[in-house]
Image (cartoon, rainbow, N blue to C red):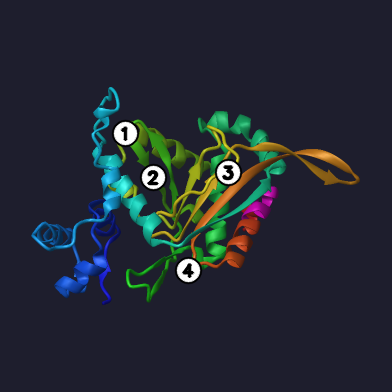
Amino acid sequence: MTYIASPSVRSYAGRKGVDLDAVAAATGRETLAKEDVDQHLTGASSPGAMAPPASTRYWDVDHTAHGPVQDEPVSRMAQVAADNLSAANALIPQVTHHDRADIRKTEAFRAKLKEEALDRGIKLTTLAFHVKALSACLKAFPRFNASLSANGQTLHMKTYVHVGIAVDTPAGLMVPVVRDADRKGLWQIASDIADLAARAQARKIRPDEMGGASMSISNLGGIGGTAFTPIVNPPEVAILGITRTEIVPVWEDEAFVPVPMVPLDLSYDHRVINGADAARFLKHYADLLADPRRLLIG
C-alpha cells in the first residue's frame, strides 16, 4: 500500500531492521511514525512473528571478545546528521557529475582585490566566488532551486536563493546558510561566510540560520582530494562538492599551458534532475568562474 514516512522514520526503521512496507500493511496507516516501528518490533517479538533481518547482527557484536576497545559516545548532533544522511542515501536516487573550472582569471581578480580586502578587514576567499557563481546558476537553472514534495507529486519552485555552507566543527558537521546570496555582492558574501563559519565553530549558530538552503556547498579544498560524491541534503535536490585546486596542462596556442583548475562534484536527485541538465548546470558554473566579470554583470 502507499504510505508516507519521513526520512528520520525510514532511517530509524532501517537501524531497527523493520520493513516499513510490512508495517504499513499491518497497520493500514497512510502516515508512519517511530511509534509504529516500535509497536511492530513489540509484535515481532511475540511467538511466530517475523524477526528483524539477520543483517542487523553485524552491528550487535561484542567487540571486547576480539581485543581491548574504548567506547566513545556519539554526540546528539552527530546522531541527527547520521539519521539524515542515512535516510537521504537510502531514499534519493543520487548521481554525481564531475567537471572542473579554469580559475586563472578568478584568482587574478581576487589578487587585485587583496589590498582593498585588507582595508575592509574582510578575508576574500575563493569560496565567496563559488557562492556567487552558485547563486547565479540557481537563477539560470530554477529546477535546481526546488524541493520535491514527500509524495513526489509536486515540485516546490523557490524564488529565493539561499546557499548552505558545510562547516567542519569539533561538534560535527554544521551547515549555516548565506541568505539571499543572489542579491549580495562579493564583499557581503565573504563577510557572511566568515561570520557564519566562526560562529559555527563556537557553536553560536542559531537554528534559524541553518535551515532553508536552496542548495549547499561542501568545500574540501583546504584539506585535499581530487574528487568525491557528496550526499544530497533533503529537501534540497542537489549539492556541490569542491576539492583542492590543481595545476593541469592545457593545450593552448599549440603548446601546453599550466592552468589552475578546481575540481567540481555535483550530486543531484535523479527524480528531479536529469544528467543533461546537470552537465549544463556545471558547465555554466565553470564558465562563470573562468570569467568572473560575468558574475558582476549578471
Taking the view exactly as shown, the residue that stands out farthest to the top is 68
Camera-near label (4 vs 2) is: 4
- The label number, if any, that marks residue 227 in the structure image: 3
x then y, percent, for residue 105: 71, 43
SS under mark 3: loop
Which residue, given by chain and number where applicable, does mark 2 sit on? Answer: 175
Q: Amino acid at mark 2?
A: Val
Task: Say if 238 sits above or below 169 in the image.
Answer: below
Q: Tell me: 96 left or right of 13.
A: right
Cα distance in 3D space between marks 4 and 3: 23 Å
Task: Say if 258 sits above or below 208 in the image.
Answer: above
The mark nearer the N terminus, 4 or 2, is 2
User: Between 57 and 278, which is closer to the camera in this rendering?
Assistant: 57
Which residue, given by chain and number where applicable, does mark 4 sit on? Answer: 272
SS under mark 4: loop
Q: Main secondary structure of the magenta part?
A: helix
Task: Say if 248 sits above or below 95 in the image.
Answer: above
Camera-near label (2 vs 3) is: 3
First to last magenta residue range: 285-293
- The label number, if any, that marks residue 171 in the structure image: 1
Which residue occupies 68% across, 40% down?
109
SS under mark 1: loop
Q: Amino acid at mark 4?
A: Val
In the rendered image, which quarter contains the N terminus?
bottom left
Cα distance in 3D space between marks 1 and 3: 25 Å
